[in-house]
Image (spheres, rainbow, N blue to C red):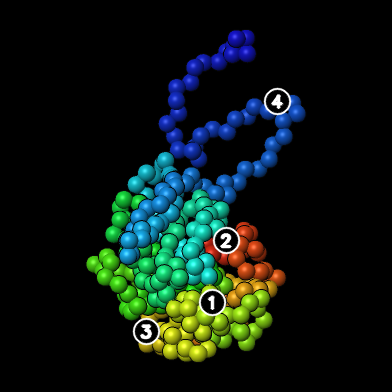
Amino acid sequence: MSDLEGLKLIPPLQVPPEQFPESEELPEGVKTVAWKDAYGFGVEFLPNVVYANRGGINLHLQIMVPKSGQEPDRKWPLIMFVQGSAWHKQDVFDHLPNLIRMAQRGFAVAIVEYRPSDIAPFPAQVQDTKAAIRYMKINAGKYRVDADRTALWGDSSGGHTALMAGFTGDGEPDMDAYREQSAAVKCIVDWYGPTDIAKMNYYPSSMDHTQADSPEGFVIGRKNVLENPELADATVPMNYLSREKDTPPLLIMHGGSDMLVPFNQSCRLYERMKELGKNVEFIKLAGANHGFMGFNCDEALDAVEGFLRKYI
């Protein structure tokens, strides 16, 4: 105990973390590096929360809530994330690493499961997303979220679904679930979502988007896209915009080398938003492909975070 000579027992220090004293001990050979708290919060993960039942099918949310020991009652801004899947059965954990990082940055996140197109074509996915938004708002206290600070984010077919749900809000297409609460959101983030399925084949892609068994064909009821223009037109988010109607601010991000959803799909959306005088930002990720490839980087998440901080 000779190393304790001259020292006294110290009672626990009841001070905030930023006031806790820095140790000045530095044994020979110890290296010092600057510390940066890049992701400031722990995350509570609440898996498989049932938010609705459609035709005997339970639909789930995967919920992530930041943890702050200093502020246990803090209400967090909410991201509703719609995982893309070509409108088929989702792997809702596909973007989990990115979404956990967003929760660490101080956002609650709820990943939305929607009905796949093989059992429920459009607009089922949009209706399910609106029900999920309302569920989270109704249960805001339970999940420690601020219902008035809700954003909608999706990728690929989830981006399309986010656009449709965000642009239409409490209007059609909709269902009766939780209608006592609004499905409106403060802003939208669209990662490489299709926006006009009848025009996808006019630009480079690795697949045919027109046939009945294509993802686009499935989402309109397993029909040929070009032979059913009225069904295809109903899925076009731009058709739900007008100069008079309020539209949430939108961030579009798309890879310049997307092999599945042509980059032009986002250009069409951006140009229409600008034409109508809407609040829209568009970021091209040069060389990035579709999906997780190219978007699993701090630059992409930083852009989303910066946009969300402005509006929620």
Q: Amino acid at mark 4?
A: Pro
Residue 94 in the image: above or below residue 202: above
Q: Which residue is label 1 attached to?
A: 213
N-terminal of the pair, mark 4 or mark 3, is 4
Q: Say which quadrant the N terminus sits in.
A: top right
Residue drawn 41% across the image and 69% down it: 119
Mark 2 and mark 3: Cα distance apart in space: 29 Å
Q: Which is closer to the viewer, label 3 or label 1?
A: 1
Label 4 environment density (alpha carbons within 10 Å; few <14, some 14–19, many ≥20): few
Q: Which mark is residue 301?
A: 2
N-terminal of the pair, mark 2 or mark 3, is 3
- Residue 59 occupies quadrant: bottom left
Q: Amino acid at mark 2?
A: Leu
Q: Which is closer to the viewer, label 4 or label 3?
A: 3
Residue drawn 43% across the image and 89% down it: 230
Residue drawn 53% across the image and 89% down it: 226
Q: Amino acid at mark 1?
A: Asp
Q: Which mark is residue 204?
A: none
Q: Which is closer to the viewer, label 2 or label 1?
A: 1
- Mark 2 touching mark 1, by CB under 8 A? no
